Amino acid sequence: MGLYDRDYTQSDFQSEHRYAPRMRIGLPQLTPVVKAIIAANVVIFFGGIIIFRKITLVDTPAGRWFSVFPDSPGAMLQVWRLITYQFLHGSVMHILFNMLGLFFLGPTLEQHWGSRRFLIFYLSCGVAGALFYILLVAVGSLQPLPMIGASGAILGMLAACAILFPHFVVFLIVFPVPIRTAAVILTLAYLASLITVAQNAGGDAAHLAGMAAGAAYVVSQRWRGALRYKLEIRLRQKKTTTQRSLQAELDEILDKVHREGIHSLTRREKKILKQATDAERSRNTP
């Protein structure tokens, strides 16, 4: 999966997406999280070959402990597998295509969102893929088999980019197609695989769920931002109301001290007065 540039990727082209990073001719510049994820996948893949003398880690102790393999209720509850399976691959072509997708799509999203947000997004799409696969196994729709690979996360990025940057073009096998067309074709292919319970139906379930998670994350950004803003407003209002209430109570305590002396205060009133005094000293301390 790769990208190439068209006329609208030149430096003088004004994107319809106000905050979208502008594409350039040439290979993307690796960003920190993308670089770290690629390095981790490559090291684990070749390290597994050296240690276990096998290209795929599925039939090794690492595969048995770190793949998603929902063959029992206990295995379904081993939550670390939701992350670790994303860093295991079954063949050279498997890791190659996944890392190419990360290489071409990841830097744009990381630059757009920031490293921390991108990492959470990436791993979450992979987790969504694993959870959907586990759900289908739990209800008896699929047979439990070990699942490995970063494809769910990669397809989540594809879906996100299809919404945010529709001018992207990707290679579907060997054919360059608009990214939204690729997303539709892949979605239909994965649905067909699930309906017919094809050989890789479990993997395709993860692909489909990863895409759904990526699309849902982008589509929900506006209302999530509005909800966050409302919560922040309410928290500020609550804080202001609390401060005013405390100030009114403190004023009453000071009036009581002025009228009757500090010895007339109750234990609670003395505690409030001390806390207010300490807070005032903290504010005045350089």
Image (cartoon, rainbow, N blue to C red):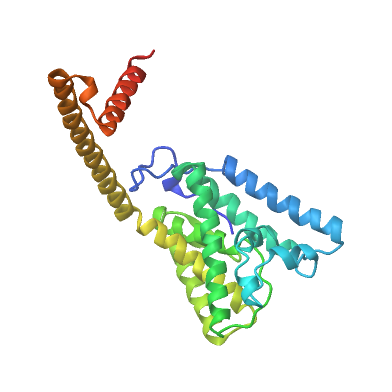
Q: Residue at x 79, y 54 (%)?
A: 46
Residue 156 is at least partly visible in this image: yes
Q: Which residue is drawn at 19% across and 19% down?
A: 261
Which quadrant of the structure image shows residue 274? Answer: top left
Query: x, y percentage for residue 68?
Result: 65, 68
Query: x, y percentage for residue 251?
Result: 16, 26
Q: Which residue is drawn at 45% across and 57% down?
A: 160
Foreground residue, 225 or 153? 225
Which quadrant of the structure image shows residue 85? Answer: bottom right
In the depicted structure, whether residue 119 falls above or below residue 200: above
Horizontal arrangement in the rendering, residue 68 relative to residue 256 (left or right): right
Foreground residue, 206 or 73? 73
Horizontal arrangement in the rendering, residue 226 relative to residue 100 (left or right): left
In the depicted structure, whether residue 202 falls above or below residue 100: below
In the depicted structure, whether residue 205 falls above or below residue 110: below
Q: Assign the N terminus to one quadrant of the image.
A: bottom right
Q: Residue at x 61, y 58 (%)?
A: 83
Residue 90 is at least partly visible in this image: no
